[in-house]
Amino acid sequence: MVTGPRGEGRLFTDPDVDRAREFFRQKSRKMVPKVTTVREAVERFIPDGTYIATGGFGANRISTAVLHEIVRQRKRNLAFAGHTTTHDCQILTAGGCVNRCDVAYVVGLEARGLSRAARRAFESGEVEVTEWTNAALAWRFKAAAMGVPFLPVRVMLGTDTMRKSAAVEIECPFTGTKLVALPALFPDVAIIHVHRADVYGNCQIDGIMISDLDLARAAKRVIITTERLIPHEEIRQNPNATAIPYFLVDAVIEVPYGSYPGNMPYEYFSDEDHLRLWLEVERDEAKLAAFLDKYIYGVKDFTEYLELCGGIERMRQLRATEYLLDREARGEGGPYA
């Protein structure tokens, strides 16, 4: 029962589970090869106006290659799920691709500083905002993955975030407790970078998965980029390692170093110099435009971008740094031991 106020924010997606099921019912579950290119995946699945959500966390295990291609193809009026999405949001707002956003954590690149491009987009009103917390957005994905129109929680009660959200205050029918109803979030497209996948879309992820398992089940379409394609037989040898099954996936693209300049756990460290360069050029709109011309619009694909950023030698350095830091974390020594 609705007993309290509704948030002032606009609900950008439809939480109706039955309408979502109508779509999912028509989606093919055939185990067929889905390997394609980044360009083709963006052209096919992300028309202007699409609501997109990205996996990973902050600048960790993000699908930079797809984000660059969205900018390169000059997609417009996209909606974006801002759940722990920092460099993702920085790229999309710099490219002018987003006009509405469910915000939890977007503008700050952790200890590195604030994205001025993203901040300008939000403060100017160029991007319409509805506010949530990280937990709230994660649970909205979970509601969709569960096939329920909302989840009752206590998060955001008594805060301005609740007031700026699109949530609804309700009363528990069993105890009379005041709760918040979080509406299910069904993105049109989820973009997730993984460690390994086969040609059908069975995916393996090493380390923390954040909300990616719920996101993959909530989204109507799923684009996977992977560090490497592996044989299907290798997937079958360890079925418990499959985090995202093939029947959720619509496109698979092998993109080595696809999270660069972000971190890929156990694979390569983030390129802090390049991320600082992003933050530096954002101070001046003309410098940012020149930067985008050089690194995104001026290259044909992500491989050329990597070459501009130092190529395989730079990637080897970042891989060595990740290895040493992982050893240190395990108590086996490292650069700071």
Image (spheres, rainbow, N blue to C red):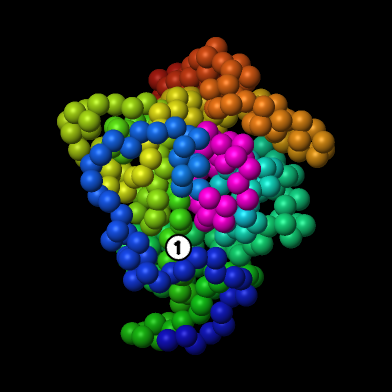
Q: Residue 211, image x and y in percent?
A: 42, 50
Residue 271, horizontal then vertical, whole percent = 59, 26
In the displayed structure, 17 sits above or below 85; it is below
Per the rendered image, the range of residues in magenta is 47-76
- Residue 50 visible at all: yes
Report the label total: 1
Residue 72 on the magenta segment: yes
Residue occupied by mark 1: 185
At x 30% / y 58%, what residue is drawn?
A: 26
* Residue that appears at 23% across and 42% down: 31
| Residues packed near mark 1 inside 10 Å, few (<14), some (14 to 19) or many (20 plus) | many
Q: Nearer the viewer, residue 266 or 243?
A: 243
Most extreme residue toward the top is 313
249 is within the stretch colored magenta: no
Seen from the viewer's position, the closer of residues 219 and 30 is: 30
Type of amino acid at the residue the image marks with label 1: Leu
Decide which of 216, 208 is in the foreground and name it: 216
Q: Nearer the viewer, residue 278 or 48?
A: 48
| Residue at 40% from the left image edge and 55% from the top image edge | 219
